[in-house]
Image (spheres, coloured by chain):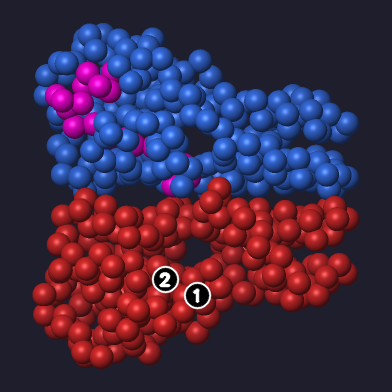
Chain colours: A blue, B red
């Protein structure tokens, strides 16, 4: 579809699965987790129960690896009727620590896009999740130099975005958000009157899934690769 | 000592143990944790080992209840040589969830102080820890209306404060920080050239302890109660 980006002055980038790989590590850890529990349940059942546990705990733990670790431990206890071995619980802690320590892998074209846009636009990072973890990833990524501002939000609902744009004195009409999640990076942005570009990642967490039939979903630009944004913006 | 507050335009408040009770709940939970491990070690040893574990994990987990929960679980496995029962691990998860769900108890005089200062100064909250947890506590506290800005920092070192003041366009000479921790709320603030008021809480986490002999420690105002600040500021 045609979208007019001529007014855009500020571009917000989601981080996980937009600038760097993230969901893949969660999926890998879920695989390991299911293997640890294979004496008790099928992989499919373990996946389902872990997801239910994450959803039940989301309001209290929020997003991020630490909450995921706590949900894995609680799920392991539940699924095994408290039979899971203590060594396995120690292994779950290790799985989580390895996720936190994982090197940052930039997605294709990220550095090229940021370096070409940085002189024409004010670039900011808008991510949700764990504060320390996101700050650490940004530092490891080497991308900090491109961004005027980095905001870690506890959630990405309309009100989170509205409050932030107001705080940063950014006009919604001049704001474009780029991200991999329709639910978090596109729909709330369209709802507050800003513009959005969707760059899907090959893997999407079930919690971030929305129906493509949502009436607003079509009112934005969808790109296969972040690099394609350069065709639509001054650089 | 005499401190000149006549230039002050912006006041930053620490939150945990400055606006509301926090450390007390950690201490209570540590008591319960030691009881759960009493078959394996003395309370003293459990306390020491848990603290060591928290320090070893601080760089990866950061501050906050979720990291504390994960450190309790890891400590319980270590201290019991993996003998701790699965039910006990479930109880540790419950202890942490209860901390997260705990009602917010405001400290004495907080509402009075904020309501008297709000018209003369720009008030902000500067806290470290878990983003979601701190946002939730602020909301539960009913104090949001007094604050122009709330910033949750991953740490409270000089660079965290300098970056934030620059970002918020606050002149260090016009900034006063009020908090219960010499290490986090007073010393780094004095080092960057701003002013600080120390209002000790009756309990201080070992990690936040500093020697009172530190040369800068005397260069600030120490108050027994937050309410006393009203004697030193316009209101």
Residue drawn 17% across the image and 60% down it? B170
Quarter occupied by residue A24: top right
Asked if disc 1 and disc 2 are in contact, CB closer than 8 Å, the reply is: yes
Q: Residues within 10 Å of mark 2 (few under 14, many from 20)?
A: some
Question: Label 2 lies in what chain?
Answer: B
Residue drawn 50% across the image and 75% down it? B209
Badge 2 element: helix
The residue under label 1 is B209
Q: Position of residue A100 (x, y in %)?
A: 57, 39
| Residue B32 as seen in the image, left or right of residue B200 | right
Along the line of sight, the residue nearer the viewer: B84 or B46: B46
Q: Is residue B213 above or below residue B20?
A: below
Q: Quadrant of the C terminus of chain B?
A: bottom left
C-alpha separation, residue under disc 1 versus residue under disc 2: 7 Å
Q: Position of residue A84 (x, y in %)?
A: 85, 43
Q: Position of residue A57 (x, y in %)?
A: 60, 47
Instruction: Give, as a single range, the part of the protein colored magenta.
Output: A113-131
| Residue B177 as seen in the image, left or right of residue B60 | left
Q: Which mark is residue B183?
A: 2
Quarter occupied by residue A183: top left
Along the line of sight, the residue nearer the viewer: B46 or B14: B46
Along the line of sight, the residue nearer the viewer: A155 or A100: A100
Q: Position of residue A209 (x, y in %)?
A: 50, 25
First-in-chain label (1 vs 2): 2
Res. A216 visible in picture? no
Task: Tell me, yes or no, whether the highlighted magenta stretch contains residue A120.
Answer: yes
Res. A38 visible in picture? yes
Question: Label 1 lies in what chain?
Answer: B
Are callouts 1 and 2 both on one chain? yes
């Amino acid at each position: 579809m045609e979208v007019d980006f001529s007014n855009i002055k500020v571009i917000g980038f989601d981080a996980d699965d937009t600038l760097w790989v993230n969901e893949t590590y969660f999926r890998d850890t879920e695989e390991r987790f299911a293997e640890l529990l294979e004496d008790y349940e099928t992989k499919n059942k373990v996946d389902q129960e872990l997801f239910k546990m994450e959803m039940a705990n989301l309001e209290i733990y929020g997003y991020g690896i630490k909450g995921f670790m706590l949900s894995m431990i609680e799920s392991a206890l539940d699924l095994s009727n408290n039979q899971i071995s203590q060594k396995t619980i120690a292994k779950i802690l290790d799985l989580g620590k390895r996720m936190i320590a994982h090197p940052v892998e930039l997605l294709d074209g990220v550095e090229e896009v940021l370096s070409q846009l940085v002189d024409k636009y004010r670039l900011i990072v808008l991510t949700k999740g764990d504060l320390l973890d996101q700050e650490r990833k940004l530092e490891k990524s080497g991308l900090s130099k491109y961004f005027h501002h980095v905001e870690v939000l506890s959630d990405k609902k309309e009100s989170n975005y509205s409050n932030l744009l107001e705080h940063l004195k950014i006009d919604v009409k001049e704001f474009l958000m780029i991200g991999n999640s329709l639910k978090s990076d596109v729909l709330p942005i369209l709802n507050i009157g800003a513009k959005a570009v969707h760059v899907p990642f090959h893997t999407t967490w079930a919690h971030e899934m929305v129906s493509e039939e949502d009436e607003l979903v079509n009112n934005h630009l969808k790109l296969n690769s972040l690099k394609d944004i350069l065709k639509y913006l001054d650089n």
